[in-house]
Image (cartoon, rainbow, N blue to C red):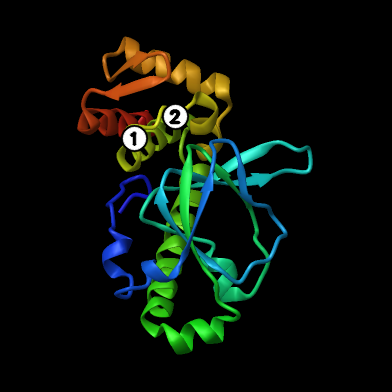
Amino acid sequence: MNFYESKKVNILEQLPLGLIEKGSLKTFEKGKILYRKGEQDKGLNFIKKGIVGLMGFSVSGDDTLLRVIGERNLLGYRSLLSSESYHASALALTDVELIYFKFDSVQQLQHEVPELHNLLTQTLAVDLRRAEQRLKDITGKRVISRVIETLIYLKQIHPDHPWTRREIGEFCGARTETVTRTLSKLERDGYIQKSGREIKLNDIGKLLEFSEQCEIF
């Protein structure tokens, strides 16, 4: 399966019964940092509402959108399982509501809620596969294909969020100007419709066919 093809998984249905009620609610306004790279917290977050971006920062200070995590998904589990500090900062791309669960150690999690521990390890394995596929796409595909497939992916998982050209570019390793030119071409050719930051995909199937043609020629 291509990295950019997304199937929505309802994590809420897989969580142990009654777990949500044991957490504490936290709220963050759009643009606020949930946690920073290098910080360490043994807790676990469930996104009740909103969209969170995991941001990486280069030596020059430029930020890069590494991952996008939406509501009904878990956040911070890699650091909990590995007992390491956060490898990236979490930024609220919209207003966000989190349910926070405190665990003193991964051993406590494994002992008290083994089904949750199993779910987290399975989720981590899926994340690794997707990361490997994404790296392969970024290094092996033309930039126009990366922009197209990133746009499809982001619009599938969070269709109502007004994705910026910069966010699309950060996610697929393309300059903002390149994203802007690509979107203009796609609009001229009838694949998308633009209205400000809003982007409508006219036909995902035809858009993917065009992306594949770009790789052949």
Contact, mark 2 vs mark 1 (Cβ under 8 Å): yes
Seen from this angle, which residue lies furthest top?
A: 188
Q: Secondary structure at mark 1?
A: helix
Instruction: Give left or right: position of 7 versus 96.
Output: left
Query: Which residue sits at x=66%, y=70%?
Result: 84
- In front here: 191 or 89? 89
Three-letter amino acid code at the position of disc 2: Trp
Three-letter amino acid code at the position of disc 1: Lys
Q: Which residue is mark 1?
A: 155
Question: What x and y, as percent, mark residue 140?
Answer: 49, 43
Q: Secondary structure at mark 2?
A: loop
Residue 195, can we see it? yes
Q: Is residue 43 above or below residue 194?
A: below
Question: What x and y, as percent, mark residue 112?
Answer: 44, 86
Query: Which residue sits at x=33%, y=32%?
Result: 160
Residue 140, can we see it? no
Q: Check the picture and name the quadrant holding the N terminus.
A: bottom left
Q: Which residue is mark 2?
A: 163
Query: Image quadrant of residue 188?
Result: top left
Q: Is residue 164 above or below residue 54?
A: above
Q: Earlier in the sequence, mark 2 or mark 1?
A: 1
Question: What x and y, as percent, mark residue 54?
Answer: 56, 48
